[in-house]
Image (tube, rainbow, N blue to C red):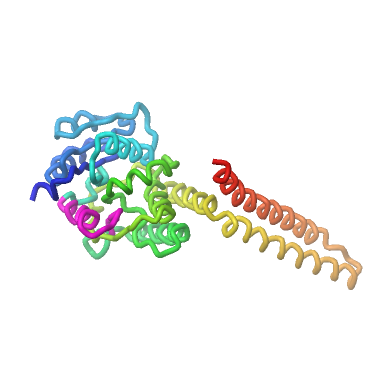
């Protein structure tokens, strides 16, 4: 099967310095979609040349802007050229393009808006340290979606045109956090998301251009900020109330200890004041972030 349907489909491949794998990925991918678009995100090697030779349309960023920016560029191209469905697949060879029809089928035939590749089973070859980091990011992303997310970081996905049109204006991050951001925003927009089992190759592949620890921490930090921005009362004000409560209890203890023992615990008093100030500030910030967006909506 060379094409999944008469609907126009495009595969968007964000990549940076993937000259060793991009040719093979393009050749395998174009069997299952109408067009392959490679977003060359500031590569310094022959990625652009090889991708074109393999039959892909290539859009190049002059400098590296990040995976999120590359995905946005690909989505914009798909919308401007009126494609009905978009597949995103990484250019490092870890995903198997043969599984593209399965991803597309779940948005073409089953009433879903987004089909997420779910790396499951022994076929994923995922190292243990990646499994642990992935699970942390899955749980964190779940906080922003209100439900359990099975594979928040898999970049192998299929989108309906409706999903792309809805999500593009909401994407702000430029980094690898784009996968989590898509899911959080999809939940906010009421889009239907489904998992599709896929394999994933890691053995003999250096699939990351960043230090894994810094990569994971940067994604985690951005995801937490996105969640806090969308639910400021829960993730900023509520912890603020907790800090204020602890500060008050510590202050009471310090006062009582001073009365009973005629000794003033200056360190405890200082800590109580710090907790009260930070807690009060967090409560205020959470309230402001909660009120301002609603006020702006009313003015529109």
- Residue 82 horizontal/vertical position (percent): 24, 38
Residue 177: within the magenta?
Answer: no
Magenta highlight range = 98-118
Left/right placement of residue 78 relative to residue 297 reads left
Q: Nearer the viewer, residue 74 or 151?
A: 74
- Residue 262 horizontal/vertical position (percent): 91, 68
Residue in the image at 34% along x and 43% along y: 165
Q: Residue furthest bottom?
A: 260
Left/right placement of residue 35 relative to residue 239 reads left
Q: Nearer the viewer, residue 42 or 156?
A: 156
Residue in the image at 28% along x and 49% along y: 159
Numbered disc total: 0
Examine the rendered structure and indicate whether residue 8 appears above or below residue 107: above
Examine the rendered structure and indicate whether residue 25 appears above or below residue 101: above
Q: Residue furthest top?
A: 62
Tell me if I can see residue 172 in this picture: yes
Residue in the image at 21% along x and 39% along y: 22
Tell me if I can see residue 17 in this picture: no
- Residue 2 horizontal/vertical position (percent): 9, 47
- Residue 129 horizontal/vertical position (percent): 37, 58
Residue 242 found in image quarter? bottom right
Q: For the C terminus, which image quadrant?
A: top right
Q: Nearer the viewer, residue 120 or 226?
A: 226
Left/right placement of residue 287 relative to residue 110 reads right
Q: Residue furthest left?
A: 1
């Amino acid at each position: 099967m060379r094409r999944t349907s008469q609907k126009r489909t495009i595969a968007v491949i964000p990549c940076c310095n993937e000259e060793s794998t991009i040719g093979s990925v393009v050749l395998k991918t174009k069997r299952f979609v109408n067009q392959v678009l490679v977003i060359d995100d500031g590569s310094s090697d022959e990625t652009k040349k090889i991708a074109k030779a393999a039959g892909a349309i290539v859009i190049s960023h002059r400098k590296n802007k990040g995976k999120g920016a590359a995905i946005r560029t690909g989505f914009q191209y798909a919308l401007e050229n009126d494609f009905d469905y978009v597949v995103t697949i990484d250019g490092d060879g870890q995903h198997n393009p043969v599984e593209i029809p399965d991803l597309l089928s779940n948005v073409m035939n089953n009433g879903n808006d987004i089909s997420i590749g779910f790396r499951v089973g022994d076929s994923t070859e995922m190292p243990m340290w990646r499994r642990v980091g992935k699970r942390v990011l899955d749980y964190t992303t779940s906080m922003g979606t209100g439900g359990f997310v099975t594979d928040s970081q898999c970049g192998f996905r299929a989108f309906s045109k409706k999903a792309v049109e809805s999500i593009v204006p909401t994407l702000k991050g430029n980094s690898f956090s784009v996968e989590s951001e898509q899911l959080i925003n999809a939940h906010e927009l009421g889009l239907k998301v489904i998992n599709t089992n896929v394999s994933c190759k890691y053995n003999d592949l250096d699939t990351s251009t960043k230090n894994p620890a810094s990569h994971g921490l940067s994604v985690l930090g951005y995801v937490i900020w996105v969640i806090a921005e969308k639910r400021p009362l829960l993730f900023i004000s509520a912890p603020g109330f907790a800090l204020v409560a602890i500060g008050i209890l510590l202050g009471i203890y310090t006062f009582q200890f001073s009365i009973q023992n005629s000794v003033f615990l200056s360190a405890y008093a200082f800590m109580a004041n710090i907790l009260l100030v930070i807690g009060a500030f967090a409560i205020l910030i959470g309230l402001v972030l909660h009120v301002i967006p609603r006020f702006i909506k009313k003015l529109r």
